[in-house]
Image (cartoon, rainbow, N blue to C red):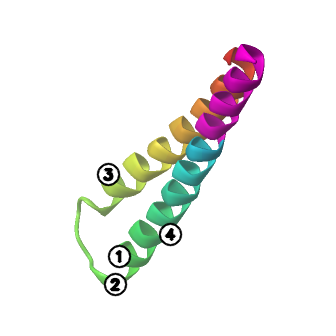
């Protein structure tokens, strides 16, 4: 019974992290759209941060699948 509960909790974490990765993808798209609409010298910093956020969320999904 404990193994079934552990698997359920594990896959709920993985599903939550996949949803978070989908949010990160949407955030990257919004930053790119904002950068096209508003000209500013810090746009490149926002783009880099959004891509780093996306990469870290993808790595977190892979880590959760392998570690849990």
Which residue is drawn at the image coordinates 32% and 51% (left, top)? 45
Which residue is drawn at the image coordinates 34% and 84% (left, top)? 37
Instruction: Determine which of the numbered discs, if any, sits on residue 29 in the image.
Output: 4
Q: Are marks 3 and 1 in contact (CB under 8 Å)?
A: no
Q: CA distance from mark 4 to mark 1?
A: 9 Å
Q: Which residue is mark 2?
A: 37
Categorize mark 4 by other alpha carbons within 10 Å: few (<14), some (14-19), many (20+): some
Asked whether, in this view, residue 56 is left or right of residue 47, the answer is right
Chief secondary structure of the magenta portion: helix
Q: Position of residue 40 (x, y in %)?
A: 23, 70
Categorize mark 3 by other alpha carbons within 10 Å: few (<14), some (14-19), many (20+): few
Circle 4 or circle 3, nearest the eye = 4
Q: Judge by depth and name the residue closer to the eye, 37 or 28.
A: 28
Q: Judge by depth and name the residue closer to the eye, 46 or 56.
A: 56
Q: Are marks 2 and 3 in contact (CB under 8 Å)?
A: no
Q: Which residue is mark 3?
A: 45
Q: Which residue is mark 1?
A: 34
Q: Quadrant of residue 62?
A: top right
In this view, 7 is above or below 32: above
Q: Secondary structure at mark 2?
A: helix
Which residue is drawn at the image coordinates 42% and 49% (left, top)? 48
Q: Which residues are magenta?
A: 1-14
Pointer 4 or 1: first along the chain: 4
Q: CA distance from mark 4 to mark 3?
A: 15 Å
Pointer 4 or 2: first along the chain: 4
In this view, 51 is above or below 67: below
Q: Are marks 1 and 2 in contact (CB under 8 Å)?
A: yes
């Amino acid at each position: 019974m404990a193994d079934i509960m552990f698997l359920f909790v594990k896959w709920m974490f993985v599903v939550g992290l996949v949803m978070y990765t989908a949010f990160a993808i949407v955030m990257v798209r919004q930053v790119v759209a904002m950068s096209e609409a508003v000209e500013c010298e810090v746009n490149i910093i926002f783009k880099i941060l959004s891509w780093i956020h996306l990469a870290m969320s993808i790595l977190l999904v892979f880590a959760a699948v392998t570690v849990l």
